[in-house]
């Protein structure tokens, strides 16, 4: 059978890995796919770099449009990133009858609805396994492996940089700033780490998973996002004492009022498998009504792990293109004319449990004042711990764990607690998820 | 589009779950599959039970042949089990142009090559996600999610009963016999638990995964199988002290000489995620050359978790049947005419590390005698620990950990050690796997 011709846009970390792995495992991949999958054209601004990577038979260009419009190309692999040029090139490739494989989570989380609609009109496939959790085949698990289930929730460690920082803070007792600096030196964090440490990258990924799990459109603007920059070693330690680990989680959940969609630091019970995922590794837990909780773990980034996902998509697209479009795996798992308009609910309405820490002046009546306020907002306390005062301070730390509570009540209670004269500074508030099997 | 008509053979635990989940999540499943998937016929010897489960519109029969030969049935779901009637029915269904979904690992591990060949000749699909690790979509991950990779090894906790027993022995300090009795009372172990505790069930499953990972035929007769009946609390405790957990693993590995295929109790480092999989849960680690180690975790048995896998296959088959056969996902991941004849190597030739425990009379020169024998067989020791003698005994335990060694050398060394007059009883030998990422 005629080989499938791939045009590769971008030979950065993932592009380079894709070329290398496809070449190295060429024979096994062809034995699986039933035909050859060959990169025949490469575009990159850095022609030197592209030529160094590619065999002489590959056409190398600095004009990506040559690839997206070339009649011999079957699938365009977009690994440029960003939301401007990448978007134009993907739309152009689709317009020219090509299928698209991309790792561009930012683009799909923001413009997925538009891109998927255009692709659908043209009968083109847009595949994006590499956009979420790197080499872990989580999109495939959600779209195909768990089709029997009504998905209840997903919770994932889906940013390796943030997880590395939290692991190091806990294991070595270092501060956020110290570990960030170290991560940047090791190449685990970028010079501008905003997307990773502020939870934006995780928000892109949970947006995509949420759409697939619940059959709703991608709605990046609706994600509540809170990063890890404010986390202190103190809270990590106290959480540990209480049997919890703090992880930056992307969470999406189906509740009565709609869909929850959020990224924030979260206390999870230490005995859960996902609490033990350390360093740059990723893991996603999916709870389905039939299967219960399943977990998927692996490298969430890096050259060859991400290439593994890109190439799996290439094999899938190679296979799927011969099926009639109604029988292809739908882009967002559900048939596009059967998406649901279930609303994403505002963070204020989300119900979860909370860890709170406050510094108070150690005198009689403080506990009574605080618990009175909490009771006023119908917040039920599951644990209340006063930590010994340090020698050089007249304040003590109070740790409070709550049962399930609506976020707006916690927020209102915190505002009132902070006005108490015995409370010094801000109340720290971190959400808790039990993630029961 | 016309609904897909399913004929269900067997309404036991999994059959009942399949009917229930398909009915309950009917609407979401149809939104994903693009068409209705409906069980229209059910066969079971127990007509009463089948009628109680099914809606009145479903045809219920005690003659399974009515279903396998019925012109309106598109897919036959075989959930009877066993290797005789089930095999005949599957072959009959294929002969009548039906696709088959089955959870029957024993049948496929033993007769897969024959069944797959017959199916291929008829253009029929045989799907078996439910045969391995229950609800975990591990067959899909191996066949489709990791197509980019040259798989290096797979190691799995793929028998929930055995894992439950080992977890309880460790956590509660009970003996094998005590926990087995308890597991039987709880329904986690069958009246005849041989398949689970002797590793046979795990051997069926690792046989199937090995074939898919390495593109070799299913070869159940080649699996080395050792169960957990000889394990003592003592070894579990010593392993723990050394930083290891003991798990019954199914392991298959590609090495220079061929393919390793084995099931046995294994020490694995406690810090590995899979070492922390407890109770009846299953987990499989797959190491690929591009992606590194990925792990898949979930319920490995039970009514609805297994039904989740059966139904995922139904959706897959529904989709795949419209693709031309060359573009379907191959049954064993690789195109059937491109299977490899890489041999499964005998256990004697397998290289691994070992934990050994022996009881010796506590007198000078014992260590020298033992280490001399070990050196004679080129076995390199990584740790040697002498445990204090108990008050009422004149013997002590010696624990020895080795570096990588060929199994036949360990066996020969053990024979010689056991002939030493200072050594009382048998030498306990448990393999160690580091399972590095």
Image (cartoon, coloured by chain):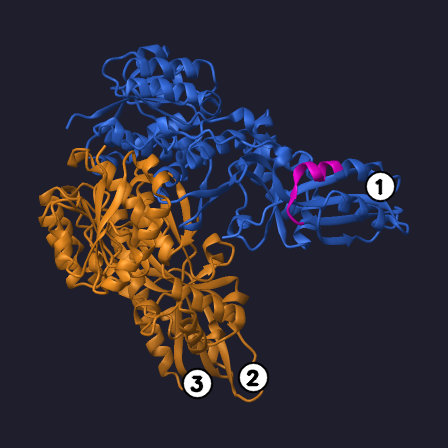
Chain colours: A orange, B blue
Residue at mark 1 to residue at mark 3: CA–CA distance? 71 Å
Q: Which is in the foreground here, disc 2 or disc 1?
A: 1
Tag 1 residue:
B423
Give SS at disc 3: loop
Residue at mark 2 to residue at mark 1: CA–CA distance? 58 Å
Vertical relation: A89 (above or below) B376 = below
Asked whether residue A10 is in view, the answer is yes
Q: Please name whichever residue, B304 or B348, is drawn nearer the observer in this view of the structure.
A: B348
Q: Which residue, as the protein is rendered here, is positioned at the far front?
A: A56
Q: Quadrant of the N terminus of chain B?
A: top left
Q: Is residue B431 shown in magenta?
A: no
Instruction: Please tell me which residue is depicted at 64% across the width and 34% down the height of the picture.
Output: B348
Give SS at disc 1: strand
Tag 2 residue:
A390
Give the magenta range. B403-412
Q: Indicate the chain on which mark 2 is placed.
A: A
Q: Please name whichever residue, B40 or B240, is drawn nearer the observer in this view of the structure.
A: B240
Tag 3 residue:
A422
* Residue A147: quadrant of the picture: top left
Do callouts 2 and 3 mark residues in contact (Cβ within 8 Å)? Answer: no
* Residue B40: quadrant of the picture: top left
Residue A355 horizontal/vertical position (percent) = 43, 68
Residue at mark 2 to residue at mark 3: CA–CA distance? 17 Å
Q: Please name whichever residue, B417 or B188, is drawn nearer the observer in this view of the structure.
A: B417
Tell me if mark 3 has few (under 14), some (14-19) or many (20+) residues whose alpha carbon lies within 10 angstroms of its own: some
Q: Which badge, 2 or 3, comes first in the chain's sequence?
A: 2
Residue B433 horizontal/vertical position (percent) = 59, 46
Predominant SS of the magenta segment? helix
Instruction: Please tell me which residue is depicted at 39% across the width and 65% down the height of the picture.
Output: A161
Q: Indicate the chain on which mark 1 is placed.
A: B
């Amino acid at each position: 059978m005629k080989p499938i011709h791939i045009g590769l846009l971008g030979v950065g970390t993932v592009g380079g890995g894709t070329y290398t792995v496809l070449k190295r495992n060429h024979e096994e991949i062809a034995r699986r796919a039933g035909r050859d999958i060959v990169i025949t054209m490469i575009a990159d601004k850095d022609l030197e770099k592209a030529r160094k990577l590619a065999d002489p038979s590959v056409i190398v260009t600095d004009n990506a449009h040559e690839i997206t419009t070339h009649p011999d190309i079957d699938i365009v692999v977009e690994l440029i990133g960003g939301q401007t040029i990448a978007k134009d090139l993907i739309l152009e490739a689709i317009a020219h009858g090509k299928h698209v494989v991309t790792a561009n989570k930012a683009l799909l989380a923001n413009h997925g609805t538009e891109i998927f609609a255009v692709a659908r009109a043209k009968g083109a496939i847009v595949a994006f396994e590499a956009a979420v959790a790197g080499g872990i085949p989580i999109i495939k698990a959600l779209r195909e492996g768990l089709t029997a289930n009504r998905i209840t929730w997903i919770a994932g460690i889906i940013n390796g940089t943030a997880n590395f920082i939290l692991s190091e803070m806990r294991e070595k007792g270092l501060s956020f700033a110290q570990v960030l600096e170290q991560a940047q030196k090791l190449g685990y964090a970028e010079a501008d780490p905003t997307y990773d440490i502020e939870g934006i990258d995780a928000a892109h990924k949970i947006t995509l998973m949420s759409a697939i799990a619940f059959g709703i459109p991608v709605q990046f603007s609706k994600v509540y996002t809170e990063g890890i920059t404010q986390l202190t070693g103190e809270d990590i330690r106290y959480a540990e004492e209480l049997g919890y680990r703090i992880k930056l989680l992307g969470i999406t959940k189906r509740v009565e009022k709609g869909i929850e969609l959020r990224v924030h630091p979260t206390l999870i019970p230490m005995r859960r498998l996902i609490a033990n995922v350390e360093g740059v590794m990723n893991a996603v837990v999916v709870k389905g009504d039939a299967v219960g909780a399943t977990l998927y773990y692996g490298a969430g980034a890096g050259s060859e792990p991400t290439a593994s996902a890109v190439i799996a998509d290439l094999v899938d697209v190679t296979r799927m293109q011969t099926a009639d479009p109604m029988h292809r795996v739908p882009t967002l798992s559900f048939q596009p004319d059967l998406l649901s308009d279930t609303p994403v609910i505002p963070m204020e309405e989300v119900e979860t449990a909370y860890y709170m820490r406050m510094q108070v002046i150690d005198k009689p009546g403080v506990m009574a004042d605080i618990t009175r306020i909490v009771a006023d907002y119908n917040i039920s306390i599951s644990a209340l711990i006063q930590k010994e005062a340090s020698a050089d301070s007249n304040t003590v730390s109070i740790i409070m764990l709550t049962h399930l509570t609506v976020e707006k009540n916690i927020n209102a209670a915190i505002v009132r607690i902070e006005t108490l004269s015995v409370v010094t500074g801000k109340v720290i508030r971190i959400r808790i998820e039990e993630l029961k099997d």
